[in-house]
Amino acid sequence: MGERQEFKVLKLDKNNYVVWKWQFQNVARANGLGVLFEEEMVTPEKDGRGLALLGSALSDENILKIVNCITFKQAWRTIE
């Protein structure tokens, strides 16, 4: 059985976007969510996991920007 690893992602703020984006994408890929950044269909389960991961990596100010987003892609585009 594989050992589960936990990764920490910086909280996105107004000063760290480039480093945050790089770190977030790597953590998502390490958690089997690389499909989120591809132009293909994403299962509802992976979309929900991606949205939860994204929400956990945002400052309170940035969460307010995506609070009405329903999908990961919609939230990701809003942050970008």
Image (tube, rainbow, N blue to C red):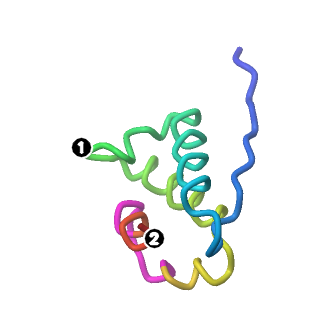
Mark 1 lies on a secondary structure that is loop
Kindly indicate the quadrant of the structure image that contains residue 58.
bottom right
User: In this picture, is 61 found above or below 18?
Assistant: below
Mark 2 lies on a secondary structure that is helix
Relative placement, left or right, of 52 versus 77 is right
The amino acid on which the numbered mark 2 sits, given as a three-letter code, is Ile
Image quarter (top left, top right, bottom left or bottom right) of the N terminus:
top right
User: In this picture, is 69 found above or below 6?
Assistant: below
Q: Which mark is residue 79?
A: 2
Say which of 19 and 11 sits in front: 19
Relative placement, left or right, of 40 versus 14 is left
Relative placement, left or right, of 28 versus 77 is right
The residue carrying pointer 2 sits among few (fewer than 14), some (14 to 19) or many (20 or more) residues within 10 Å by Cα, namely some
Q: In the rendered structure, which segment of residues is drawn in magenta?
A: 66-74
Check the image and name the residue furthest to the left: 40
Tell me the residue at 61%/46% (across/down).
Answer: 23
The residue carrying pointer 1 sits among few (fewer than 14), some (14 to 19) or many (20 or more) residues within 10 Å by Cα, namely few
Tell me the residue at 71%/57% (across/down).
Answer: 10
Tell me the residue at 62%/75% (across/down).
Answer: 14
Q: What residue did someone put label 1 on? A: 40
x, y percent for residue 50: 50, 53
Asked if residue 32 lies in the magenta stretch, the reply is no
Which callout, 2 or 1, points at the residue further toward the start of the chain?
Answer: 1
Check the image and name the residue furthest to the top: 1
Tell me the residue at 40%/73% (across/down).
Answer: 78
Asked if residue 70 lies in the magenta stretch, the reply is yes
